[in-house]
Amino acid sequence: MATIAKEPPGTRTRLANLIQNQKFQKNVFVLSALVPMIIFFGVFYIYPVIGGILGSLTNWRAFVPARDFVGLAQYQKLFADPIFLASVKNTFIYTATYLVINTILALSLALAVDASGILRSLFRTIYFLPVVTSVVATALIWNWLYQPRYGLINIILNAFGIPSQPFLRDPSQALISIVFYAVWKQVGYDMVLFMAGLSGISRSFYEAAKVDGANRWQVFRYITLPLLQPTVVFVTITGIIGSLQVFGPVYIMSSLSINDLPGGPLNSTYVISVYQYQVAFKQLELGYGSAMGIVLFIIVLVVTLFQSRFLRRRWEY
Amino acid sequence: MATITNAPGTLATAERSTPRRAAGKRPRVTWDKLLIWIVLGIGAIIMVAPFYWTVITSFKTTAETRALPPTWIPQEWTTENWKAVSGRLDYGGSLLLFFGNSLFVCTIITVFTIFTSALCGYVFAKFNFRGKRILFWTVLSMLMVPASVTLLPLFDMVVSFGWKNNYLALIVPIIFSPFGIFLMRQQMMNIPSELIDAARIDGSTEYGIFFKIILPNAKAAIAALAIFTFAFQWDNFQWPLIVLDRVEQFTVPLGLSLFRGRNSIAVGPVAAASIATILPVLIVYFFAQRRFVEGIALTGMKG
């Protein structure tokens, strides 16, 4: 701080007062920011986590104040519930297919758009377009695109001589159809992340590789990909976390009428969060739903840890 | 004193159109560039086709939406579908009302989030106090708190507060954002402490410094956080679905979801409604495109 050297001795206490006063002011300021924050996180983050864990050990029902401790009964019920087991399987299928298709496509698009010269910003704008639109609106649009008779996709397939597909109306195609929608919606976002990663790679690496006579595949494999590793980790981890907890697209596209239960046809598209929603807010079984939420959290945690470790080891130099 | 630590992430270099290969001499269109254009062009058509199809469907008569083979341009243009969704809808509410509701809720959330994030981020970046490190890590760890676990207790809490069917339930539980605080702290570490000290010597109050020096100096980060908070909330579906029952209060995603199942009867109104809710967002996107893309590079995530 500015030490003032030639102050007359009488003002020293006043200066001290001022500093004290400033310190006091600072403390008030800091507390005025942090106290509400601490209360907030306590009430809306920490308390619900504890409430969720404890709730999963009870027969908690919505709007019923009394609850009994039931131990791990809800968890036992979970692992005997065929719909829950199916929804776990569906969640994994959804995540795995989404992750593979989306990551490869986003990276390829980033490389291609980056190399497309004067059309670069045009392509980037177009591929990013679905990202800014709303899930519900575009999912409704895709419901219609997937329509067996009048849907655009079948019309195009027919034009190429391929017979019409039932898509969302067929248990074996419904989930993957939702994945394709999700990729269409989201790929531009990950593409932009990859493009940001690419532009962070120093051009000197490419020049050196050129001097060494590396071909394009070698440049990609030994320079671009390793240097892009942080972006790859980020894209896959956020992709995993997001798609393990997917709700909106599945909720909208898995019931073709507002009166249908979600997860159809024949429970083929139930994912964990949609089933949890159904159990908790339609059947009002909050205890059972909490147990589901905790299982989902454990799955997310385990997969994320496994994935980050795997990716790190794979590409480390 | 002001040692600038934690340089911000590489900011938005994605924006500059880098003539990466332009080190050469001739701006000639090569064969592989042509190939890239063709492939990307086909992909671009796939990205845009759903929108095009929906727009033309919204101007077709019901009979024509079911015509086989389909028409790529309406033979008979009609505004029936648009009229059907412009007024009051059969199940209550109207698109305009949903829009107003969404705008209201998202604006309030965004303003609060910006303010709390900037304030707490500033405190973590520029003040020293006991327990700062632990507190900061605690805030960061809130990022890992899983929605699937907290969803049901939060619902229970909101009901016990009497906030069901009340916008308070949408706003209050998210006015502090761990991610926002983190982002703002990273940005505010770059503001020189001399600037703040000088203002103190000039007799500014702490809040005066925050509003007159700190906020203007963090504009870029604030814009990015604002866009993402707003966009994320605009699209928020699950929580409003749980908390709101009355159609008059519905936000845009909820209102639109009511159109489900009506597409077997007439797809035209669904198409019109979807496009009507997408259009304003697209207009904002085309004007603020750079901000969107820079924001991604800056924040590295959504929401």
Image: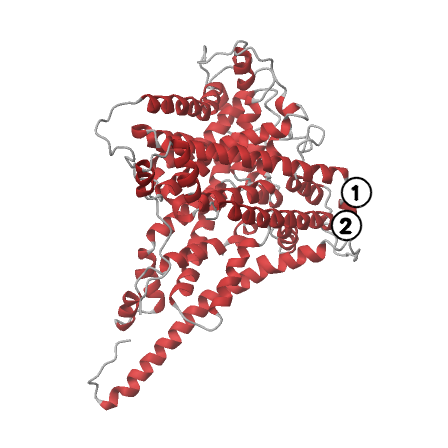
Which residue sits at x=53%, y=40%?
Answer: B251
The reply to whether residue B92 is in sight is no
Image location of residue B83, percent across then percent down? 48, 23
Of A207 and B57, nearer the camera is: A207
**Lateral position of residue A262 relative to residue A232, left or right:** right
Q: Nearer the viewer, residue A124 or B275?
A: A124
Are dots 2 and 1 on a single chain?
Answer: yes
Tell me which chain the residue with mark 2 is part of: A
Local crowd size for mark 2, using a 10 Å CA cut-off: few (<14), some (14–19), many (≥20)? many
Residue A74, numbered circle: 2
Front of the two marks 2 and 1? 1
Residue sticking out furthest to the front: A212
Name the residue: 50% across, 66% down. Answer: B135
Three-letter code, disc 1: Ala
Above or below residue B280? Residue A305 is below
Left or right: B90, with A201 as reference point: right
- Image vertical order of residue B132 relative to residue A73, above or below: below
What residue is shown at x 24% (from left), y 26% (from top)? B27
Residue B278: give x, y in percent of width and height.
Answer: 45, 32
Q: Secondary structure at mark 1?
A: loop
Q: CA distance from mark 2 to mark 1?
A: 10 Å
First reached walking from the N terminus: tag 2 or tag 1? 2
* Residue type for callout 2: Gln
Q: Please give the chain letter of the residue carrying mark 1.
A: A
Evaluate whether residue A146 shows in this view: yes
For residue A80, the mark is 1
